[in-house]
Image (spheres, rainbow, N blue to C red):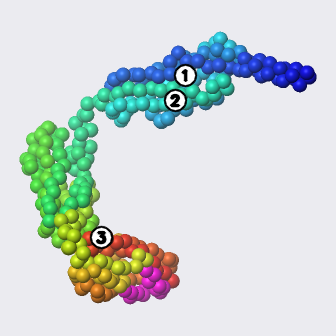
């Protein structure tokens, strides 16, 4: 009998305790701003909540899912039957298009975590001429100053453009040339540019003329009003990655193809500061047709290579390396050598080279 009474008392106490907890309710949990103009700036909505419980309600934290959304809330305890507010502000600047953000509310209510949501669509503000052409090269304004042709197959061509404008009150003469890369042809579609006129710098990459494989870079320079300036101000960076096309190989051709075998890491040893170190990297052609060494790359001007042009099937050959440690401080060094061949299975191989200067 005592046990039954004790259980009933415990249950009654729990029920009373539960009834004493705060209960949070909201007038809405989602707000749709609809279409808003980026130019109009921040927009705000208010979520009203009420304490439907029997104990004071305290919001311990209100957190937005993005820095573009800022919540402010009633921080004082909300007595039973009273209301509070959560003000949510969204900043559309630089965020065109649809958006949907979550605001997480944490409190001491029976349901401790609540999620609110705002959504809408930002209509971008009209671009000003100065925003469309942010790059300044003397009197000339450009949309950008770098072009990446991406990956293209050796033998193919590709053209890219950069638009320019004369935003001054005087006519401008424009020309362009590419330094040290004859395989990229550059022209200005409008050489004499009147105020408020626009033109295009056109860059045509002809990969067959380069004879190169792998990453290639070049610099173009814009000549404004006859001023030939080789500084970074008038420079346009050009880049591409030229690959060999193996997609047309037949099954038989693939069976006859070369197969390169090489270590993926090579320790060159120790070299005294100011001295030179000679080493070699051995390549094996485990295939049948000749292995062609398309290119050897390493971002290190002090390493010089002597590379075999071709290796017959079943044969070996060495890439001879010479390292000049004149400019090196005593330390351990690691560099990546990139080997590009006509092996259709692994045309690009990265090899780690390690050495110590003491």
User: Could you say which disc has been placed on residue 86 in the image?
Assistant: 1
Q: Earlier in the sequence, mark 1 or mark 2?
A: 1
Q: Which residue is mark 3?
A: 345
Q: Dot 3 lies on which element?
A: loop
Nearer to us in this view, 167 or 107: 107
Residue 35 visible, this orientation:
yes
* Residue 182 left/right relative to 215: left
Q: Dot 2 lies on which element?
A: strand
Q: Quadrant of residue 118?
A: top left
What predominant SS class does the magenta segment belong to?
strand
Give the image location of residue 13, x and y in percent. Answer: 80, 20
Which residue is at a point 49% across and 81% down the rendered structure image?
356
Give the image location of residue 85, x and y in percent. Answer: 56, 18
Q: Which residue is mark 2?
A: 103
Answer whether labels 1 and 2 touch (C-beta < 8 Å).
yes
* Residue 132 left/right relative to 275: left
Answer whether labels 2 and 3 touch (C-beta < 8 Å).
no
Question: Around disc 1, counting alpha carbons within 10 Å, would you say few (fewer than 14), some (14 to 19), or many (20 or more)?
Answer: many
Asked if the stretch drawn in magenta spans residue 341, the answer is no
How far separated are the C-alphas under marks 3 and 1?
Answer: 60 Å
How far separated are the C-alphas under marks 2 and 3?
Answer: 50 Å
The quarter of the rendered structure image containing the N terminus is top right
Give the image location of residue 354, x and y in percent. Answer: 45, 78
Asked if the stretch drawn in magenta spans residue 269, the answer is yes
Q: Is residue 313 above or below residue 82?
A: below
Q: Quadrant of residue 131?
A: top left
Q: Earlier in the sequence, mark 2 or mark 3?
A: 2
Nearer to us in this view, 19 or 70: 19
- Closer to the camera: disc 1 or disc 2? 2
Region in magenta: 266-280
Give the image location of residue 245, x and y in percent. Answer: 20, 66
């Amino acid at each position: 009998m005592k046990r039954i009474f004790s259980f009933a008392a415990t249950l009654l106490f729990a029920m009373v305790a539960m009834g004493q907890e705060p209960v949070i309710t909201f007038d809405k949990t989602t707000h749709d701003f609809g279409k808003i103009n980026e130019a109009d700036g921040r927009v705000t909505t208010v979520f009203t909540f009420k304490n439907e419980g029997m104990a004071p309600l305290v919001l311990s934290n209100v957190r937005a899912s993005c820095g573009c959304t800022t919540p402010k809330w009633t921080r004082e305890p909300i007595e039973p039957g009273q209301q509070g507010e959560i003000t949510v502000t969204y900043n559309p600047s630089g965020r065109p298009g649809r958006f949907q953000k979550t605001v997480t509310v944490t409190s001491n209510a029976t349901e401790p975590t609540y999620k609110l949501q705002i959504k809408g669509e930002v209509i971008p503000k009209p671009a000003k001429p100065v925003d469309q052409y942010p790059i300044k090269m003397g009197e000339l304004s450009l949309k950008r100053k770098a072009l990446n042709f991406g990956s293209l197959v050796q033998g193919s061509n590709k053209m890219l453009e950069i638009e320019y404008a004369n935003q001054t009150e005087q006519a401008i003469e424009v020309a362009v040339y590419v330094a040290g890369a004859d395989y990229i042809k550059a022209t200005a579609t409008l050489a004499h540019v009147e105020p408020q006129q626009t033109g295009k710098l056109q860059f045509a990459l002809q990969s067959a003329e380069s004879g190169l494989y792998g990453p290639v870079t070049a610099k173009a320079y814009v000549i404004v009003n006859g001023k030939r300036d080789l500084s970074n101000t008038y420079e346009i960076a050009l880049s591409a990655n030229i690959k060999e096309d193996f997609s047309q190989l037949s099954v038989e051709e693939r069976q006859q193809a070369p197969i390169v075998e090489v270590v993926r890491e090579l320790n060159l040893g120790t070299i005294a500061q100011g001295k030179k170190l000679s080493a070699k990297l051995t390549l094996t052609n485990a295939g049948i047709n000749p292995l062609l060494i398309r290119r050897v790359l390493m971002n290190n001007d002090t390493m010089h290579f002597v590379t075999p042009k071709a290796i017959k099937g079943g044969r070996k050959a060495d890439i001879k390396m010479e390292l000049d440690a004149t400019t090196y401080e005593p330390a351990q060094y690691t560099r990546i050598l990139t080997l590009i061949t006509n092996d259709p299975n692994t045309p690009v191989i990265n090899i780690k080279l390690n050495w110590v200067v003491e």
